[in-house]
Image (cartoon, rainbow, N blue to C red):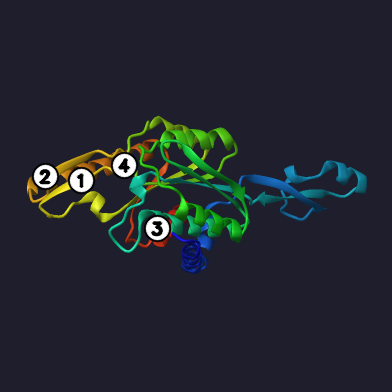
Amino acid sequence: MQIKDIVKKVKQIEIRTRRKTEATLMGQYHSAFKGQGMTFAEVRPYQFGDEIRRIDWNKTARFREPFVKVMEEERELTMMILVDISASMDYGTKTQLKREYVAEIAASLGFSAAGNNDKVGLILFADKVYKVIPPQKGRKHILSMVSQILTADYIPAVSKIDKALEYMMGIFKRKSLVFLLSDFEDNYDSKILKVASKKHQLLGMRIYDEKDNEIPDVGYALLNDAETGKQIWVNTSSARWRYTFAEAQKQKQRNLEEDFANSSAEFMNINTGEDYSRLLYNYFQKK
């Protein structure tokens, strides 16, 4: 895309996502993720009903009347968005490519976090980690992340989710909110999901186009694997072939859901034609 096209696209995404975020997501986000603990705020005179364990004994002894420590919640969190930039994500048969749809989701997540003064970071990966944007706050930072997702070179290579999660865990030790966006077309070691979900709050988001699951009858067709370059001729007029393909895709989705469930992580299956804000709202509400 040309620079002016990128700027236009980013502005369009900002307008759409900020409207959705402010109307439906921000309040649920704040309720769902309440921070990492409590921190000292002030000391005040004891009031009936205060917990005895909150008494500040030093100040109580000095003034000869009871004082208590007031604690407040540490609200600030870190959100990490991991985006698959393998070539299969640069594809779409509806109104948007997967990458454009992912950019919108990332913007909504980012604005939800920014509205609560949380930091947001981005990792772009395929067969390895290609770009890391450290967590920061603010609107300009979110829009910069959106631009990076839209303009990245989508790599013709097998996606390695394991490497992305290992890299993220190696850098970010403190518990974070982790959103993993991919079409999950490639294999991975499910053990990494268990490790990641123990250290962080993990949500896997499978982004798919309707043609990923079912291929229409178009006669003989040359199918090309965008990531490996492998090509194969198939007869899409064969009802048996189409059924076998669709069933294999359904089984892959069931396996994904099972892997995430067994890892105590969340999973979401999203068609590029769906309203992702409704799904995120339900996820935040459940949390």
Which of the marked residues, 4 or 3, is nearer the chain's N terminus? Answer: 3
Which of the marked residues, 4 or 2, is nearer the chain's N terminus? Answer: 4
Residue 130 at x, y = what percent? 49, 40
Horizontally, residue 165 falls left or right of residue 274, namely right
Residue drawn at (41%, 37%) of the image: 161
Disc 3 from disc 1: Cα separation: 24 Å
Quadrant of the rendered structure where residue 139 is? bottom right
Disc 1 from disc 2: Cα separation: 13 Å
Which of the marked residues, 1 or 2, is nearer the chain's N terminus? Answer: 1
Where 5 falls versus 162 (above or below)? below
Residue 104 at x, y = what percent? 45, 59
Residue at mark 1: 223
Which of the marked residues, 3 or 1, is nearer the chain's N terminus? Answer: 3
Where 147 falls versus 267 (above or below)? below
Disc 4 from disc 1: Cα separation: 15 Å
Residue at mark 4: 185
Q: Hey, what amino acid is under mark 3?
A: Tyr
Disc 4 from disc 2: Cα separation: 19 Å
- Indicate which label's residue lies in the foreground, 3 or 1: 1
Residue 141 at x, y = what percent? 59, 56
Q: Nearer the viewer, residue 143 or 228?
A: 228
Q: Hey, what amino acid is under mark 2?
A: Trp
Circle 3 crowding by C-alpha within 10 Å: few under 14, some 14–19, many from 20: many
Report helix, strand or loop for mark 4: loop
Disc 4 from disc 3: Cα separation: 17 Å
Say if residue 246 shows up in the picture.
no
Residue drawn at (53%, 53%) of the image: 145
Which of the marked residues, 3 or 2, is nearer the chain's N terminus? Answer: 3
Q: Are marks 4 and 2 in contact (CB under 8 Å)?
A: no
Residue at mark 2: 241
Residue at mark 3: 101
